[in-house]
Image: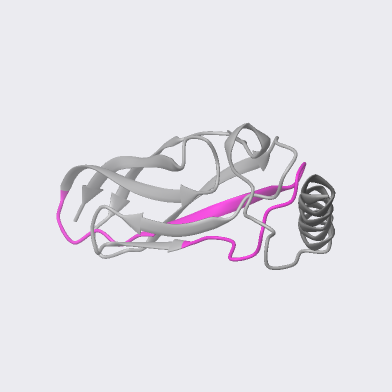
Amino acid sequence: MKRIIILTILTIFCLNNTVSAQWGGNNATLSSGKDANVQWEKTIIDIGTIKQYNPTQAIFQFKNIGGKPIIITNAKGSCGCTDIDYPKKPILPGETTEIVVTYDAEITGVFNKTVTLTMNIEKSSQILHLKGIVVK
């Protein structure tokens, strides 16, 4: 009798979790691991020679090649001279999108800046590089 009660409770619990996850209930989780993955067109962009105090944009494109949506939870530049525009909504499987990095150089010379993105993929930190030379 105890076995029947325990099995009934376990069955109800499992069915409840399955239905809740299918409908995006409280038990639904962000996709991670091998199910969500990106393919970058480029992770390093050389913007060449730019003028000091003249904001310049670089566009990094990527495609979701996994089977689950990708969510970017954070984007951080290596200095305050970079502004990062990234999608706030989930990137669906097969969808291509872009990260726009605006660099406003205050110092002349060679530069190499990074942007670190945190995503719900197996290698959660993705690092993008922006390099070039700043002249007056």
Q: Position of residue 87 (x, y in %)?
A: 59, 61
Most common secondary structure along the magenta stretch: loop
Question: Where residue 102 appears, x then y in whole percent?
Answer: 40, 60
Q: Nearer the viewer, residue 1 or 103?
A: 1
Residue at point 53%, 56% (across, down): 72
Magenta stretch: includes residue 99: yes
Q: State whether residue 40 appears in this view.
A: no
From the image, which quarter does the C terminus lie in? bottom left
The colour scheme applied to this rendered structure is: one colour
User: Residue 57, position in %: x, y?
Assistant: 45, 56
In screen coordinates, is 114 left or right of 110?
A: right
Residue 76 vertical position relative to residue 41 in the rendered view, above or below:
below
Nearer-the-camera pick, 123 or 109: 123
Q: Is 94 on the left or on the right of 32, as rendered?
A: right
Task: Tell me if residue 28 comes above or below residue 70 in the rendering.
Answer: below
| Left or right of residue 77: residue 89 | right
Q: Which residues are magenta?
A: 85-108
Identified at 52% across, 35% down, the residue is: 122
Whether residue 9 is visible, yes or no, is: yes
Q: How many marks?
A: 0
Q: Residue furthest front?
A: 1
Q: Nearer the viewer, residue 52 or 19?
A: 19
Quarter of image, res 68: top right
The location of residue 49, given as percent across then percent down, is 31, 43
Q: Is residue 87 magenta?
A: yes
